[in-house]
Amino acid sequence: MAKIRDMIPAFELLQPTSVEAALNLLDEHRGEAWVLAGGLDSFDWFKDRVKRPSVVVDLGGIAEMHGIREVTNGLEIGAMTTLTEVVRHARIRSEWSVVADAAEHVATPQIRNQGTLGGNVSQDTRCWYYRSGWPCYRAGGNTCYAAAPQAMNREHCIMGRSRCVAVNPSDTAPALIAVDAKMIVESSKGPKVYDAEDFFIGPAIDITRMTVMKERDLLTRIHIPSTWANAEFYYEKVRDRGAWDFQLVSVAAAFQKEGDRITAARIAVNGVAPYPVRVEAAERIVVGTTGDEATAAAAGEAAIEGARALRHNDYKIAMMRNLVRRAVRSVA
Amino acid sequence: MAEKLVGTDIAPPDLHAKITGRARYAEDFRAPGMVFAKLLLSPMPHARVRRVDARRALAMPGVIDILRADEVPSRDGPREACLTDYPRYEGEPILAVAAVDEETAAAAIEAIEIDFEPLPFVIDPLDSLRPGGPNAYVEGNQFSGQDGWSEFRWTAEDFAVIDAGGMPDPSCPVEWTKGDPDAAFAESALVLEETIVHQSLTHHPMEPRSNMAYWEGDRLFAFVSTQSTQQTKFALASALDMDPENITFVAEFCGGGFGSKISGTTVMQVPAIFSKKIGRPVMLRVTRYEENYIGRARPGFQSWLKMGFLPNGKCNAIDLIIVQESGPYGASDYATAGMIADLTYTPQNMRFRAVDMFTNTPPKAAQRGPGGAQIISMMEPILEKAARELGVDRLEMHRLNAPRGDVKFGPRDSTLTSVHAIEALERGAEMFDWPAKVALSGRRDGSRVTGVGIGLSPYTAGSRDRDGLMIIRPDGKLYVHQGIGNLGTHSIADTARPAAELLGLSWDDVVIVWGDSSKGMPRSTVQAGSQTTHAHTRANHAAGMDALQKVREVAAATMGGAPSAYRVDGGRVSGPGGTMTLGRVAERAIQMGGRYDGHVLPEDIHEQTIPAAQMLAGQGLMGVARDNYGGEGNVYSWVAGFALVELDEETGVVALKEYVGITDCGTVIHPRSLGAQVLGGSIQGMGMAMTQRWVFDPKWGVPFANRLYTARPPGMLDVPPDLKWDAVGIADPTTPVGAKGIGEPPVGAGAAALTCAVADAMGGRCLCRTPLTPDIILAELEGRTGVGRLEQHVG
């Protein structure tokens, strides 16, 4: 079929006003329904006519999915809360600044005004072979074009590959892992709570999905527990230009200290695997130290253990090592 | 006292329309009964269409018709048609479908069954140069009008040298030599040899080349997006083999072209021909995705460069080989690159060789500073490397090698009208505070290292012999008719200023008429090669002088005395017989007729101006003239760029901290607009050198980075907010207003200042390729596997 791009095919738009109604619609339409949050990922797919759902369930009218609420033991962020709201929220800025930092690194102000936290963590990979509609493993085919010997894969993964070498594009994902966020996923069978690091899945688990969510599931809110409030945080995103760009590699880290000693650490890296990677080996090295240069170097080396480059992304191994090193160094 | 118009900031007449959204671009026009067309693009880089079955598409409700390649003009050889059954790049338009709405047209395109025979293709020109390599065309990889197709290869011995990392000594279809390079290299105190890759990248104007057309009888109404106007009308007429006077051509606004829309007539043919076929207006809205393919691209270079230097730093010899990645329809950047290398470094001894290789990538065309921007961004870091090795201050190195007024360059010893590159360097060094900044070179702050660099970039900046056309109407206003395009540079208004100033008019009494051929357009330049400011300040000056003389004659004839005794100022002409308003003069001119109101025209104006002047005859006092000012030498402008960067050695990220751009472009007509050109062009060059890229999968021959977010042109956060600029401001003595163009040279300056500063931050290590993205820099710093030395299209 000849390719046409930049024109969204018609679909039936459904606009529920409650989570319950949304879940009913997802049950009713099953695989035909596409869940629409801010639309930044969805409309790219629709414009390219690669994903052509007949039914789109727009979550924009569900009030209970918007906004940031104080709850026992932390904050609860509705999945439809915009990234701008996350960036501007006073308590997030002061107590979990890594989350605000990460949200502020998303794309551009316009996109942050429209894009949602739930959408940001649920977005699909940006592998350009896959996004171009090529019949790769992830798209139901039987090859990975990006892993081919001559492939253009500077932005692809250095670890966690399993037939697919794409990376997770979310800026907020590693930050949510760093603060040990909990993702509340609802379906008609009831809610399930996932640790942020378990919310994201790799191709070895299911090559067609980036997260645990299946077709009748809905991420309704994200709980930021108090456990890591006011920790020392570090966030850095390396990208090709200053705005409107996905990460090459990003790192988010949280450190708890007593005196100058690190007592607990959570470090997550994105852009290096099909899912955001929590680098526990590095965390173990860091705990009990002051985050001195030698520790930072060791943590960086531990983080890249097992990393393997494709043809054009050998640099990512050094970039990941250096970012982890910088994250650790930041608390010294 | 007349208002001073040249050299002041005046808002252009299209400003309010642009910022309020009232500006009508081609896509904004509508016509009764208008239908929409969509294109079917080739899914492969080289193919032959074996069969098309459109029955299902044509049966869809709302589908009007299909337009095939055999219904549009085509020519033999590597020449582009607007539709083809022999696509030579992925994305080349095969056919078009018209329907009552776009969604139906799109669905119809998807319903067409089309069978392609895939053909061998080539993405990297070096592959085609290798013995036994693939060709971009079935017939060969070289074409000449005389001899037709042939195959051109370098030898296995050439490639043995290349593969070993050396500089080959190949035969090339293009070659010129001046002086004695071999003898000069033997005398050089330092000889540097480098392998250099400059990327190919798309133009990405904000406005894709959408256009609409309809017919009334034999008259075509075309609403298009183009940089030029009057010349594009003639180019479209030529493409459609019709009388240009039967085209009403509307191009009021153009959302950027950067060379890709100098005429841009290829895609304009589709609605014109389709509309004639179906008898309804046809709108073709070109999408961003389609623009990526059909919107033109800068050719990439793979080059070998040898530069020799005397002990004091003077370049005394250059040996330059360029392999150009030319797409399926060719480009001529390499020729300009050779000329500019000789002009900028004045070696006196130079050998230049080039081979222009067809490839199965989207078509190439001039992109702001074509050839010059590439060669400057490639060679300036080598010059600075030589300075380091010879222990010469880099500013001094640039100053020493820059041309003086008596420069002779290129194979035919071309000359310049004026050159003040050294003054630009000196002014830049002062504003940038070069001595203080160069002292920061290599400074460390954690993992960040400071680097500074200079880029000196010339480009052509003028032409002669065009016509000016204007009328003073009975309302007392001067109507300046412009055949040049409104491509966003303000030249439609700014080039009219000299005429208005000659006539002593307030700017409020000047009306610019542009963008619609039915209003009358004189013979103009194409908006390319930064010609416009030079060419049309001259042409309008000539027409202004004609109008001035006629005003005096009308006054003398009406009030008595000699014409030369009359003075024109403040909307009046005054002299020994009294005073008249220019409105009254216009009325008298109409009464007097003849040459005064345009019923009799100068014999030397171009034939393309005559119909426009005849259309306007009798409406007031006409100033119409050919630019007969003459002059010798090539017109070039210059920009000297100075950059300070911080390179993060742990990430490969480069942050531009300071930039100063100084131009030598003669008399400054419009300071604010000039600043936008100097800095805007510099930023475009920075993107070319650092952030922007185009990527092809070599196995499948298709491009990625097709979207703005993946192509990554630089944004406002990629440059500091306080970029600085200035102009030398020395008039070119060979042109009456003294102004030269400015659009192109800043690109090379911005790019080269950055490539030099990055090399400086890396301790003088030159990566000799663009773009210098973080992956490439970090891989180099870490000693890890980077891209191949000569690989093109890897981004």
Image (cartoon, coloured by chain):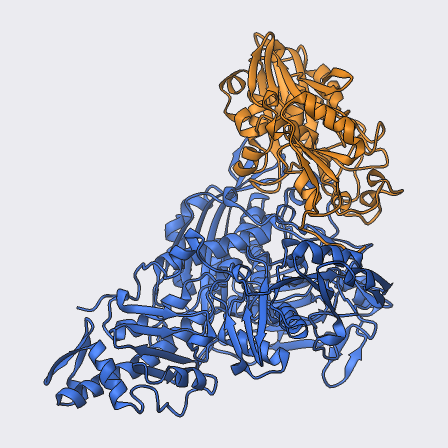
Chain colours: A orange, B blue
* Number of numbered discs overlaid on the protein picture: 0
Residue B485 in the image, given as x and y percentages of width and height = 47, 69
Residue B780 in the image, given as x and y percentages of width and height = 68, 43
- Residue at image coords 36%, 56%: B672
Residue B665 occupies quadrant: bottom left
Residue B44 occupies quadrant: bottom right
Residue B41 occupies quadrant: bottom right
Note whether residue A293 is visible. no
B1 or B397: nearer the eye? B1
Q: Name the side, left or right, on which B581 lies relative to B250.
A: left
Q: Name the side, left or right, on which B261 lies relative to B147.
A: left
Residue B500 in the image, given as x and y percentages of width and height = 29, 72
Q: Name the side, left or right, on which A253 lies relative to B43.
A: left
Residue B135 in the image, given as x and y percentages of width and height = 81, 68
A119 or A286: nearer the eye? A119
Note whether residue B286 is visible. yes
